[in-house]
Image: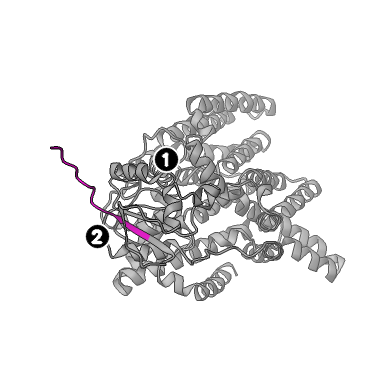
Amino acid sequence: MAIGLALLMGIAWTVRDHVALGALRLPDTDDLMRLQQVRDWLGGQGFADLAQHRLGPAPGLQMHWSRLADLVPALLILTFTPLLGVKAATVAAVIVSPLLLFAAMLIIVAAIARRLGQSGFVAVILGALAFPAITLFTPGRIDHHALQIVLVLTLLHACVGRGTLGQGAIAGSATVLSLVVGMETAPLLAAGGAAIALRWRLDGAAGQARMAGYATALLLGLSAAAVLFRTSGWNVAACDGFTAILWRAAMLAALAPAAMAVAGFATQSVAARTAVLIVGGGLALAAAAMSAPACLHPYGQVDPLLARLWLAHVNEAQPLFALPLGKAIAAGGMALVGLGAGIWFAWTTRTAASWILLAFQAAAVGVTLVQVRGAPLAALTAVPALAAMIAAARPRGPMALVVAWLGASGIAYAGVGDRLTPPAQASAHGCTPAAAAARLAALPPGLVVAPIDFGPTLLATTRHHVLAGPYHRDTQGNRAMYDLFLSPSGQAEALARRWGVDYVALCKDGFAEVGDRARDRQLLAGSLMAGQVPPWLRPISPAGSSTQVYTLTQPVRRTTQ
C-alpha cells in the first residue's frame, strides 16, 4: 500500500511539475544547493570537502551540511548515467530520490501504528495526506529534511517496540545518523533517549537489552561517524552541523546510557536504576552542556543585521503563531489536533508506547511553536493517535467517521489555510533568480553580487562565484552584499572593487525586507531600481528588463603631473 501510494502520488507530482523538473528548477534553494554539492563531489571534490568554493569570499564557504544526505542522489545519478546521459540521469535522480524516502516514511508510519494496535492501512493514508510533511517528499526535494524525518520515525518505531538488543541498536543508529545529518531534530532525539531510559528503569530484562543495544550503537556509531563523516569544516567553532563541538557533546551525553547499560547488568532494583538514571544522566548532560555551550544556541553567531533583514524572514524559522492565520492553520492544524488525540489516546490506553508517542508529539509541537520547521514531524508523529481517533469514531456512525477523517487529514487544513490566505504577490516585473541566471550564464565566469536567494540558483546553473547565499555561515558575504546595495554609489563602488566583484544583479522590485530604504535613490539599490545607473556600472540586460544585470567598468586611472 505504501509503495503503491508513493508511486501513484510520485507520478502525479512529476506530471504536474515536469517542465520545472526537466529544467532542474528545483522547488527550494536548498535543493539546488544539494544538487550542486552532489555535482561537485561527483566532479572530483573530496568526499570530506563540504566547502562550497564558489560561495562567499575566497576560498569559499564551509557548509554545515553532511555528505550523508548526498549518498542516495549521487548513487542514483551514477546508476542512471550510463543509460540516460548525465542530464537525464540527474533529472531522474531528483525525482526518484525523494519518492524512495516517501515510501519508506509511509512504511514506518504504518509499522508504528501497528505497534500501537492501530490500523496500518489507515496510517498509510493519513501519512500520504499529512501536510505539510508531504511537501518535503515531492520530486525535486533532495534536501536533507525527508531523510531526517525517516530517521526520527525509525527511532520512534524502535522506542515503542519490544525491548530487544536489536531494537536498541536501531534506535542508537538512527540517533547517530540523524545527528550526522543535522541538529534540527535534536529535541526529538532527546525524547527518544529519555523514553529508552525510562523503559530501562521499569522494564527489567527487556529494558536492559534495549538500553545495551542503544548505548553500544551510540558510542560505536559516533566513533565511526567521526571518521567517516568528518568534514573539512570539522573544526569550525559552531554546533550547527556535525562538527567537533557537536561530536564532543554527543559523546559525553552518550556516557549516560552507557552507565545505565553497565549498571543494568549489576542490578534489577528499580530504586538503584532510578539513582543511576538521575545521577548518571544528570552528570553526562551537564558535562555535555558545559563542554559545548554553543550547542545551546546553534545559530547564535548570525550577524544582528542579517538576523533582522534575512533570518527573520525565513519561513521555516518563524514561530507558528507569528504566521498569518491561514498559514498557521495549514502548518499546524494536523499537529495540534493530533496532539489532542495523542493526549486522549495515552490517557485511555495507559501503555508505555502511547506515552512515548505523546512525548514525541509534544517535542515536535514544541519545536513547531518556536520554529515552524518542526511542523512536518509534528504532523507525522500524530498519525498513530489520529488513526486511533478514527477507529473510535467508526462505531459512532458515518457522520462521526467523516468528521474524524477530516480532522485527521493534514491536506484538509492546507485547503482551509489556502482559503484564508490571500494569493501570494508575484514579482510585478516577473523577475526571478532563474531569469538572472539566464542572463549571467553566457558571460565569462566572475564574482556576482546579488540578493541572498539568488545564490543557489546561480551556483547550480552558471559557472560564476556568488558572494551571498541563504546560509547562516556566510556572514561575511551576506553582510558585504547588503552593505554594497545599501550604500551610496561611491561607497558601493569602493566595496565592489575591494571584493573583486565582476557582476551586479537584482530585481526591479527587490529588497522588500529593507522597507523604504530599497527605494532611496541615494543608495545603490534604489538608484538602480529607478533606472539611474552610476558610471562605474554598465548594463548588460536590455533596457526595461525586469531582471537587471550589470558589469563593472574599468576604474578610471588618475595620473599625477
Q: Position of residue 503 (x, y in %)?
A: 32, 54
Judging depth in this view, the residue of 147 and 311 nearest the camera is 311
Disc 2 element? loop
Residue pictured at 66% horizontal, 33% vertical: 201
Q: Is residue 458 at all visible to an observer of this figure?
A: yes
For residue 91, what is the image quadrant? bottom left
Nearest the viewer among 295 and 204 is 295
**Of the pair 462 and 412, the residue shown nearer to us:** 462
Q: Is residue 178 magenta?
A: no
Instruction: Locate residue 280: give its quadrant.
Output: top right
Residue in the foreground of this view, choosing between 116 and 394: 394
The amino acid type of the residue labelled 2 equals: Pro
Identify the mark nearer the N-term, 1 or 2: 2
Pointer 1: what residue? 475
- The quadrant in which the N terminus is found is bottom right
Q: Residue at x 47, y 53 (%)?
A: 144
Give the Cα distance between marks 1 and 2. 26 Å
Circle 2 crowding by C-alpha within 10 Å: few under 14, some 14–19, many from 20: few
Name the magenta segment's main secondary structure: loop
In terms of secondary structure, where does tag 1 sit?
helix
Which residue occupies 30% across, 43% down?
A: 499
Instruction: Report x, y in % for residue 312.
Output: 56, 45
Residue corresponding to mark 2: 444
What stretch of residues is rendered in magenta? 549-561
Quadrant of the frame with the C terminus: top left
